[in-house]
Image (cartoon, rainbow, N blue to C red):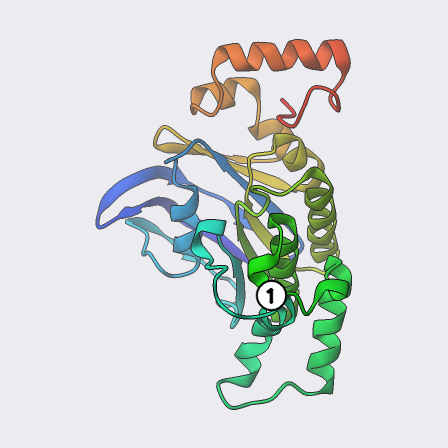
Amino acid sequence: MLSASGPLTLGYRGVPVVRNVSFEVAPGDVLAVVGHNGSGKSTLVKTLLGMLPPIAGAIDWPAGRPATIAYLGQRTEFDTRFPVRLRDLAEMGAWRDLGFTGRIDAAGRARIADAMDRTGTADIADMPIQTLSAGQLQRALFARTIVQDAPLILLDEPFTAVDQATEADLLTLIDDWSAEGRATVLVLHDLSAVLQHCTSALLLGRGTARFGAPQATLTPANLVELGYLSPGQVAWQETMYRNVGPEAAGHSGV
């Protein structure tokens, strides 16, 4: 699907944010991008979208860049004041095939209905988006992503401000995409979710990166070295893990 060759140096206007970025994403892979604030996570997403050129290295697309890349940005990038219904938001995923003058056919409407069913939004399809809760809005945005029917999906912090039940449901959708052969790259803070649902992890921090299987990459030593956790946080999490087990220890999963 894609890989970094070089390795990559990413940044803005020639100013590096992170160096030594290497990774591979194959069809069906779920790559978690993890890092502290300012480590280069969103910079990587924008580079994959073609919005930023790498400062050094290149993105390699062995089979060619996909005609469609589905992107779900952070909540701050979305204006909920726009006067549309949840149904309209889901239908926006079909615009690539329609342009400005086309109309959604029966197959397209069936795909939209299926997307709302899969995200649990069919019963609230006619609600204006400004009335939706954070979880309902994120489900609607996942429905739009499903309608886009893309081989590569980029999700930038998709679980911010949603409850645990919604996060679990949306993670199940990501598992389904993997089974369908779609590749997903998602910026994620919940390390337990990374360990349970992702096939690989890219840890960014302090101007550099580590890539590999989640268990091998998100080690306490790497998390401290790249500034994601302090030594004290790691020690506390390890104590909690030993005393009460991984589920009761919280979401960090260390």
User: Where is residue 181 shown, x and y percent of the image?
Assistant: 69, 60
Residue 15 in percent (x, y) is at: 23, 43
Q: Farthest left residue?
A: 14
Residue in front for this viewpoint, 239 or 1: 239
The vertical placement of 39 against 116, above or below, is above
Camera-side residue of 42 and 58: 42
Task: Give x and y (percent) for residue 54.
Answer: 32, 52
Residue at left offset 40%, top offset 54%: 46
> Is residue 109 at least partly visible in the picture?
yes
Q: Give the side of residue 148 with respect to residue 9, left or right.
A: right
Q: Quadrant of residue 150?
A: bottom right
* Residue 96 screen position, x and y as percent: 53, 78
Residue shown at 44% from the left, 50% from the top:
76
Whether residue 74 is visible, yes or no, is no
Q: Residue at x 64, y 49 (%)?
A: 135
The number of discs equals: 1
In the rendered image, the quadrant that contains the C terminus is top right
Per the image, label 1 sits on a secondary structure element best described as loop
Q: Which residue is mark 1?
A: 128
Camera-side residue of 156 and 40 = 156
Kind of residue sitting beneath label 1: Pro
Q: Is residue 193 above or below residue 243?
A: below
At 52% across and 17% down in the image, what residue appears? Answer: 221
